[in-house]
Image: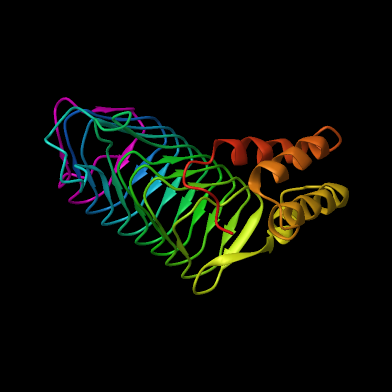
Amino acid sequence: MIHPTAIIDPSAILADNVSIGPYSLVGSGVEIDEGTIVGSHVVIKGPTSIGKDNRIFQFSSVGEDTQDKKYRGEHTRLEIGDRNIIREYCTLHRGTMQDKALTKVGSDNLLMAYTHVAHDCMVGDHVIMANAASIAGHVQVESHAILGGFTLVHQFCKIGQYSFSAMGSIISRDIPPFVLVGGQPTKPHGINAVGLERQGFSQEAIRQIKKAYKIVYKAGLKLESAIEALEEMAQETPEIECLVTFLKQTQRSILR
C-alpha cells in the first residue's frame, strides 16, 4: 500500500506489495523489493537498492549523501539486503569515490534507534547495533557482531564476527572475532562466551577460542608469533581459522 501523502519519484522501482507510509519520500534511483514496509516520514534517496521483507521505521534517512567533505555529488550507492529491521531515526549514507563508491548492509540485521552507518561501510549479516551505536566511514562489521548502545567506531576499523562491544565503547582499533570489549578506555575483556553459546558453538570450540584469546592477549607474544600459534590450533579447531585470517589482514592493528 502506498499512502496518498507519500511522494514517490516516477523513476523509483517498487515491487507490487511494498508498503510506503504517510509523508515518506522515495527518490529517484531507488529500488525496493517485495514485502518491505516503510513507515511514515522516512526519506529514501538513490541510488539505493533495498531487498525483501525489510522494515524501516519512521523518521529514518536512508541513502542520503555522505557527510564526507570530499564528496562532490558523484554516483555512489547504498545496498541493503533482506529482512533487516531499521528502527526510528537511523541514518545510512551512500559511499564515496575514495573507496568502492558503495555502502552495503547485508541481511537479518537489527539497527536500533538512532544508529548511524556512514559512507563506505560494509555490514555483514545478523549484526545488532543497539541504540545510538555509530560506525564512521569505511568501517567493516562482520556477521553476528553486536555493538552495544552508544558504541562509537573510528573510521577504517574492522569489527570481527561474533565480537561484542559493551555500552559506550569507543573503538579506535580492530576488534578480532569472538572478543568482548568495554570500559573507559575500551579494552578487551575475554571472549563473547554467552553469545557463542547462543549461536550454537560447542563447549569444546568455546574452550579452544578462550585458549586462542589467551595466546593473543595474555602470553606476551608479538602478533606474528601469536598468529603462528593460532595457525597450529586451527588445524584441529576450524573455528580458529577466521581469527587467523582476521589478524593477518588487520590494517589498524588490534585493540590490546
Residue at the image point whose x is 50% and y is 74% from the top: 184
The foreground one among 212 and 52 is: 212
Residue 138, image quadrant: top left
Question: Could you tell whether 36 is left or right of 31 in the image?
Answer: right
Quarter containing the C terminus: bottom right
Question: Could you tell whether 63 is left or right of 10 in the image?
Answer: right
Residue at the image point whose x is 74% and y is 38% from the top: 228
> Looking at the picture, how far across and down is residue 60, in whole percent?
28, 53
The foreground one among 173 and 24 is: 173
Whether 115 is drawn above or below 78: the answer is below
| Total labels drawn | 0
> Looking at the picture, how far across and down is residue 119, in whole percent?
30, 42
| Region of the chain picked out in magenta, as a range | 1-24
Residue at the image point whose x is 34% and y is 61% from the top: 114
- Main SS, magenta region, reads loop
Residue at the image point whose x is 39% and y is 55% from the top: 154
> Looking at the picture, how far across and down is residue 21, in whole percent?
26, 48
> Looking at the picture, how far across and down is residue 161, in whole percent?
60, 45
Q: Is residue 74 magenta?
A: no
Colouring scheme, one of rainbow, by chain, secondary structure, one colour: rainbow
Whether 153 is drawn above or below 97: the answer is below
Q: Is residue 23 magenta?
A: yes
Q: Residue furthest bottom?
A: 184
